[in-house]
Image: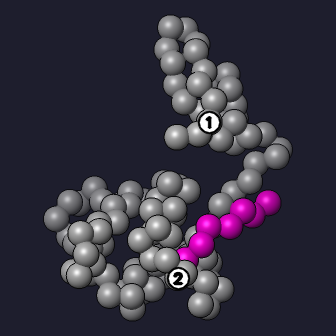
Amino acid sequence: MSGVWVFKNGVVRLVENPTVESLDGSGRQTSTTRRKVLVHTPTNEVMTSYAVLEQKLLELGWERYYDDPDLFQFHKPSTIHLISLPRDFIRFRSMHMFDIVVKNRKKFEVRDVM
């Protein structure tokens, strides 16, 4: 884990990216916000939706799981890997992107976008 630990009103919380989250907990973003995107490296295509991401993962041998209605999940039969993503693409964060990158070496990368 990296970030800044903030103590406020008797509560300690980790702010993972202080340039995105304000340290006072207001949730306002600063003007230096860097958004991250997941890119399929062989095609240089940005993953803009779960439909696009699902197509790429299926091509790589991942299978969709439908067990949990709150999650969008994929499993690769030849491994113990499981990718669990929030149901809503708006909640798709960099930690989910890096999980995909680690489990699909040289197929995806996370890039900063201004």
Q: Mark 2 near mark 1, Cβ–Cβ under 8 Å?
A: no
Q: Who's the residue at 21% across and 80% down the image? A: 77
Q: Who's the residue at 61% across and 84% down the image? A: 41
Labelled disc at residue 74: none
> Which colour style is shown?
one colour
> Is residue 26 something one can see in this rendering?
no
Residue 76 in the magenta stretch? The answer is: no
- Circle nearer the N terminus (2, 1): 1
Q: Nearer the viewer, residue 89 or 85?
A: 85
Residue type at mark 1: give it: Gly
- Dot 1: element: loop
Q: Who's the residue at 45% across and 77% down the image? A: 104
Q: Position of residue 66 (x, y in %)?
A: 20, 70
Residue 110 in the magenta stretch? The answer is: yes
Labelled disc at residue 3: 1
Q: How many marks?
A: 2
Mark 2 residue crowding within 10 angstroms, few (<14) / some (14–19) / many (20+): some
Q: Who's the residue at 39% across and 91% down the image? A: 59
Residue type at mark 2: give it: Lys
Q: Position of residue 72 (x, y in %)?
A: 32, 65
Q: Position of residue 34 (x, y in %)?
A: 74, 53
> Is residue 7 something one can see in this rendering?
yes
The residue tagged 2 is 107
